[in-house]
Image (cartoon, rainbow, N blue to C red):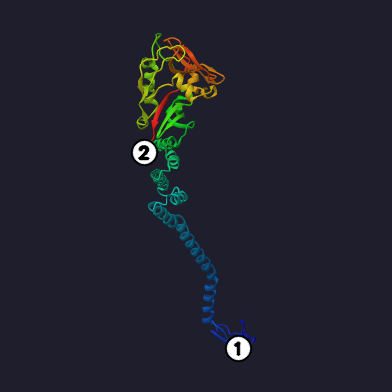
Amino acid sequence: MEHNCKYCGTVVKAVDGANKVFCSQCGNVVFDSSMQSVGNQSTKAKSNTPVIIVLSVIAVALLIAVIAIVGIFVVKPSNDYKLACELMNNGNYIEAVAAFEELEPYKDSSDRIVECMYNMAQELYADGEYEKALDLYKKLGDYSDSKELAEKSVFKLQQQALKSSRVGDIVRFGVYEQDNNLSNGAEVIEWQVLEVNGNQRLLISRYGIDCRQYDSRNMELTWAKCELRSWLNGEFMQTAFSAERQNMIIPTSVTNESNPFYGTWGGNNTVDNIYLLSYNEAASYFPVNEQRRAQPTAFTAFKNAEIKEGNCWWWLRTPGVYGVDVCGVHHNGELDPKGVYVYGQRSAVRPVMWVIVE
């Protein structure tokens, strides 16, 4: 067997069975059976090294990936949740809501958002920001007592509007069916301010709010004895106004004048929470025909109110030419001193009342 000397390059022939072979030129060991054996092991070890390195790299990469996943899906949400809770507990509700929204659906983030909105609405209400509070209460729906607080916010807004109102302004107060869609509940009533006296306001409904008989009986009678008066101060008042609003309505001493043209007796004076204008009051508060024109609501129109050119005929409380008649206002705004029968079924109602705003 021949071996090349790695030191001088001489080709050396080895004796069969020799354990070591020396170079004849430089004397260095050319072959050593023990080193060859060791060399074979070293070579084998070297051949396995790349595999081990690759496996090690993969293992490290997997470990890094696991750590990253844990950080992204466990550690970070947990830390962010704690931060959001701190924001909420410190009253920073807007920032807290934004933080919880980023976390959804982590833990109870959705519930925390609702809680923040409720607390924020409470603060706005306490600060007199009723409109902003109302928006939040509406969004909260059935959460806790949000519906009740939404109604209280509406009441506060109506009080504010009444307090700052002037003659001719339109304000909103109470509710009554108007769009003739019973499934969506009653609508807010709009009122026109007729008179301002300190913190008191005289109001008349902007529209013909209902279509009703003055009285169902075919007989002479006065405002003091008619069914419409009873309805306004009874069923209508209970339906249209909450207890808080009813407390704002001022009992009014009503002078029931006789007919200014025919002298028909107006009856005894009354004390009413809600009433109708007299002939003279209508002429005074609305000096020209155009101002007296009134449109009916969809509900009033559905009940077959007399409507011409989009306007309705509406009752006054003064008797007409006879005791069985009652004055009113035509669709064109003209006052009707003769009136129509008390049992007429096509006349609209425009309630009138004094309210006080503290």
**In terms of secondary structure, where does tag 2 sit?**
loop
Q: In this view, does 349 lie above or below 22?
A: above
C-alpha distance separating marks 1 and 2: 104 Å
Is 81 above or below relative to 266?
below
Checking the image for residue 145, the label placed there is 2
- Does label 1 or label 2 sit earlier along the sequence? 1
Quadrant of the image containing the N terminus:
bottom right
* Quadrant of res 232: top left
Q: Nearer the viewer, residue 104 or 175?
A: 175
Where is residue 103? Give x, y as percent.
45, 50
Query: Which residue has dot 1 on it?
Result: 23
Q: Looking at this view, is 303 or 259 the one in front?
A: 259
Quadrant placement of the C terminus:
top left
Closer to viewer: mark 1 or mark 2: 2
130 in relation to 270, above or below: below
x, y percent for residue 8: 63, 87
Frontmost residue, 297 versus 347: 347
